[in-house]
Image (tube, helix red, strand yellow):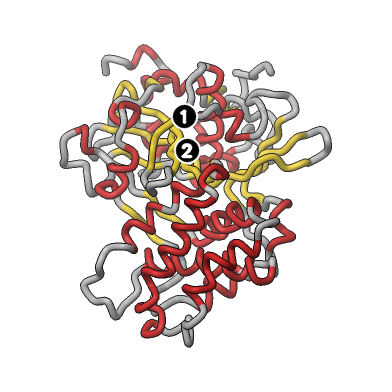
Amino acid sequence: MSEDKTTPSLFGLSQSNRDFTQKEAWGKNQFNSSFPASLACYMYSCGIKPVYIKLNKALKTEHYKIDVSEVFGEIPLSENLFFAFESDYLPYRKFVVGKLPRVDLVTQNIVPEDSCLKSVEIKLTALPDNSTYKLDEDKYGCEIVVRPDTIVYLALSIASKLQNDRQNITNFLEPAFANIEDLTKIKYVVPKKYEIINSIDNLLINYIDLQSPLVIQPVWKTVGKTSKLFSNCLDMFVWSDFAFTRLFFDVAKKKLKSEESINRYTRTVIWLAKMLYDFGKNGKINHQQVIDYYTYNTKNDKAFAINGLNTHPYMTSQELLTPRIRKEEIRNIIMGGGQNYLSPERRFDAIVLSNPEIFDETLKDI
């Protein structure tokens, strides 16, 4: 596929539901999902594979490399690949009660018409974050903020794999849920917390070979909290659906200061477990009901957030220390003056604007 470098565009995204020749396609919310997709295409063109974080049978994360074509379900730059941003993943509609939420990116085949390939959530993260910028460079970490819809897609990713094994889901989860008098009440849930966590863990171990990509997480690295990009500033991590559970399961497993409360991490475990339990019993997930009913006195605007101190152990690697994409390569990803459409905010789009030498080599020494 040839790339037009004369009009505003992003590498590899000539076929999408966003028109990058228009300024409105470069807003912060759009850029935070479209740039990572473009970065993935660029990495593929360079023969660079993202770091793939998977779960093993000991419930520990391990690093592999994954080809971007496996993440997208089609060869990037293929004329048959279409990027549908902020869309719902049609194959999951049959599993939900009510409206299926949108996911950050759905990849589709153009032929046969509009056939869905993959759905992925996207987390464009700054390295370091507020919790790690004062630390040595090898301790830098990224904050990850997770919305409820991501947990819905996590549940659906697992459920879709086990749609012919629903009884087994029930067998794993029934003992944990059977004797809870009222799942909406903290006092009835707290004593069963560890049993619920263990039931999901055992389910994941049993189907460990079925895990697949769920979240792509590009990182952009600056010098401390400044706007100055490192020379090697961009890389990408991909989380499997099973591995992603560790971000909230491992925190939920820790003893709380008060065992009479439920924090966001434990609540998110309960959301996932309840969705899967309902799917095992009924073949459907009423995701909105689960998120609205089981709040435990905490707002449900987000599932949880985890800072860089806590994500670092999962992501620590040479790629996190020295990202493989160099600063000057950004001009191969953002093309045709697209950077001029970016909004000056404290996000990656603002960082690009703060490093004009990327696009104009005469400014390198300024």
Q: Quadrant of the C terminus?
A: top left
**Residue at position x 63%, y 59% in the image:** 101
Instruction: Place residue 197 in its image quadrant.
Output: bottom left
**Residue at position x 51%, y 16% in the image:** 46
Q: Is residue 211 left or right of residue 100?
A: left
Dot 1 crowding, Cα within 10 Å, few <14, some 14–19, many 20+: many
Q: Is residue 223 above or below residue 215?
A: above
The residues bearing labels 2 and 1 have C-alpha atoms spaced at a distance of 7 Å
- Label tally: 2
Q: Amino acid at mark 2?
A: Val
Give the mark, 2 or 1, whose residue is nearer the N terminus. 1
Q: Are marks 2 and 1 in contact (CB under 8 Å)?
A: yes
- Give the residue pinned by disc 2: 238
Q: Secondary structure at mark 2?
A: strand
Which of these two is toward me, 274 or 329? 274
The x and y percentages for residue 67 are 54, 27
The x and y percentages for residue 194 are 36, 69
- Give the residue pinned by disc 1: 50
The x and y percentages for residue 68 are 56, 29
Q: Is residue 69 above or below residue 151?
A: above
**Residue at position x 46%, y 34% in the image:** 52
Q: Is residue 164 above or below residue 214?
A: below
Q: Amino acid at mark 1?
A: Pro
* Residue 27 in view here: no
Instruction: Place residue 323 in its image quadrant.
Output: top left
Dot 2 crowding, Cα within 10 Å, few <14, some 14–19, many 20+: many
The x and y percentages for residue 167 are 64, 64
Q: Is residue 125 left or right of residue 282?
A: left
